[in-house]
Amino acid sequence: MKRKPIYVEIPIKGDMDNLWSSSQTPDLHQQWDLRFSSITYLPKDHESDPQEFLYKTNIGFGLAVEGWGRSVGSFNGKDGSRTSSLHFGSDQRMSLITEGKGYWKYIPNENSSLTFLTQYDYKTRFGKFGELLDFCLFRPLIGWATALSFDVLKRWMEKGEAPTTQYIRFSINWLLTFLFAFIWIYHGLVPKLLNMHPEELTMAENLLPINLIEPSAMIIGAGIAEIIFGAAWLFSKHRRKLLWLQTFVFPVLTLSAVIGDPSTLTHPFSPLTFNLCLLILSIIGLLISRDVPTAKNCKRQR
């Protein structure tokens, strides 16, 4: 398996000093960089010494990966660009990374625009298994986290939206995505295709007073359509269009269910309240998904 360095690049409109400070000051850096939960600079004996620091990344369930880093040098180019080189690693046995090296580069462009980029690589633990785990999962994941973090930093500098707020909107957006995907696939698969619930048959029969089509065939078709729509939530690039569509679909589904079987209004899980909740969640999704940070805004290859 050929190991490729991780490369991420993004254009940012802003001031060089602000960008440098946001990425070189621990309290600011840890706010936008998804890879680090905390960064602590260690005191230096001499001003010219490399800046050493400790980092921690919380991975959930009370576990955290801790490591060390060292800014081994910086360079200011004649064209106004800046470069910061880094040596990092972890002595913790649970860390896949043993040590690595990389750099950040800050390049001024025209019209107050900057190019912010990074490239880094690292060695892994656990022999061939560690190499396979890194190639299949960890390297793509940490590359994605780097790119997402860069887009969060860009929006922070250009629009002033705090990283915490951005990550909250990002999380809500994806929670809604997985929720809607699960609901549509589940309701298409379980009560329609696998089980053919009696209430589904009753509503289909009442909605088809003229025997143009068998109720069971209608339910199968509806189940397949719901599964396809649920899958679209996972793979579509235009989820806002799906949200808009749902704001029309859920009232129609509610009205159809009530017409098909008015007794459902007295059920513990009434389609009226259920679809109303989904309609409200769709509206919330529309409100928070207008400008969600994404790793796709970064260039991932030279």
Image: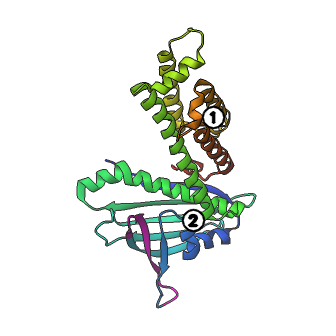
Label 1 – label 2 distance at C-alpha: 37 Å
The structure residue drawn at horizontal position 57% and vertical position 65%, both measured from the top left corner, is 32
Amino acid type of the residue that numbered disc 2 sits on in the rendered structure: Trp
The structure residue drawn at horizontal position 48% and vertical position 16%, both measured from the top left corner, is 217
What secondary structure characterizes most of the magenta part?
A: strand
Amino acid type of the residue that numbered disc 1 sits on in the rendered structure: Phe
Residue 275 or 267: which is nearer the viewer?
A: 267
Which quadrant of the view contains residue 282?
A: top right
| Residue 86 in view | yes
Q: Is residue 69 above or below residue 7?
A: below
Residue 188: x and y in percent read 48, 30
Residue 278: x and y in percent read 60, 42
Q: Residue furthest bottom?
A: 45
Which quadrant of the view contains residue 263?
A: top right
Span colored in magenta: 46-65
The structure residue drawn at horizontal position 56% and vertical position 47%, both measured from the top left corner, is 176
Residue 32 bears which disc, if any?
A: 2
Residue 258 shown left or right of residue 85 in the figure: right
Magenta stretch: residue 60 in it?
yes
Mark 1 near mark 2, Cβ–Cβ under 8 Å?
Answer: no
Query: Which numbered mark, 1 or 2, is in the foreground of this view?
Result: 1
Q: Is residue 122 above or below residue 176?
A: below
Residue 48 or 280: which is nearer the viewer?
A: 280
Residue under numbered circle 1: 250
Residue 187 bears which disc, if any?
A: none
